[in-house]
């Protein structure tokens, strides 16, 4: 199997792998960033063709992700809307086994999706705090 990664540069003992893609005619630097203690990695475009600029940007991304993981966050997190839909699906399942919960499920579905899920639709669940919740008042 041929690798699509060319001109590979390994930084921070392999925690940052920079590369250009072989299938692009105008290859910009990409990076695969992993953080010790995290369960996954982040793959991003650095949006530059300059190697030194790419290294600087990759280190910045690593720093941001390291701080996020150190503070209990995840490298990848679901959006608020995805979590809300999962919750409603579970609530529907439970409501089908208990008639009293049907009213609660209907009420939440009528309120959760039109308002909060629309407001926070693309926000990452671990990035929503008190400030974001109070902003909608």
Image (spheres, grey):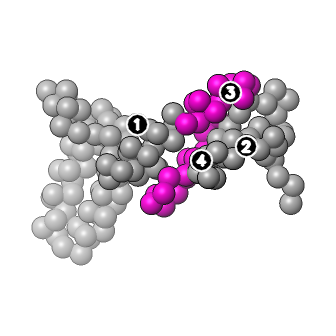
How far separated are the C-alphas under marks 2 and 3? 11 Å
Of callouts 1 and 4, which one flags the residue occurring earlier in the amino acid sequence?
Answer: 4
Foreground label between 1 and 2: 2
Q: Residue at x 34, y 60 (%)?
A: 89
Q: Position of residue 7 (x, y in %)?
A: 81, 40
Of callouts 2 and 3, which one flags the residue occurring earlier in the amino acid sequence?
Answer: 2
Q: Secondary structure at mark 2?
A: strand
Q: Which residue appears farthest toward the front when viewing the image? A: 13
Magenta run includes residue 83: no
- From the image, tell me which residue sits under label 4: 12
Q: Residue at x 51, y 37 (%)?
A: 61
Q: Is residue 111 left or right of residue 26?
A: left
Is residue 70 in view from this perspective?
Answer: yes
Give the extent of the magenta segment. 33-59
Estimate how packed mark 2 is, as few (under 14), some (14 to 19) or many (20 or more) residues with alpha carbons within 10 Å. some
- From the image, tell me which residue sits under label 2: 9
Q: Quadrant of residue 137?
A: top left
How far separated are the C-alphas under marks 4 and 2? 10 Å
Judging depth in this view, the residue of 2 and 116 nearest the camera is: 2
Q: Secondary structure at mark 3?
A: helix
The label number, if any, that marks residue 122 in the structure image: 1
Estimate how packed mark 1 is, as few (under 14), some (14 to 19) or many (20 or more) residues with alpha carbons within 10 Å. few
């Amino acid at each position: 199997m041929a690798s699509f990664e060319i001109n590979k540069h390994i930084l921070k003992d392999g925690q940052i792998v920079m590369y250009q893609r072989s299938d692009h005619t105008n290859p910009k630097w990409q990076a695969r960033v992993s953080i010790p203690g995290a369960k996954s990695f982040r793959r991003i475009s650095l949006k530059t063709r300059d190697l030194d600029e790419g290294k600087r940007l990759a280190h910045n991304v690593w720093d941001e992700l390291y701080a996020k993981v150190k503070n209990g966050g995840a490298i990848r997190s679901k959006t608020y809307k995805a979590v809300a839909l999962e919750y409603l699906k579970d609530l529907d399942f439970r409501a089908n086994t208990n008639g009293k919960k049907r009213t609660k499920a209907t009420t939440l579905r009528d309120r959760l999706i039109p308002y909060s899920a629309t407001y926070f639709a693309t926000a990452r669940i671990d990035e929503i705090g008190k400030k974001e919740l109070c902003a909608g008042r």
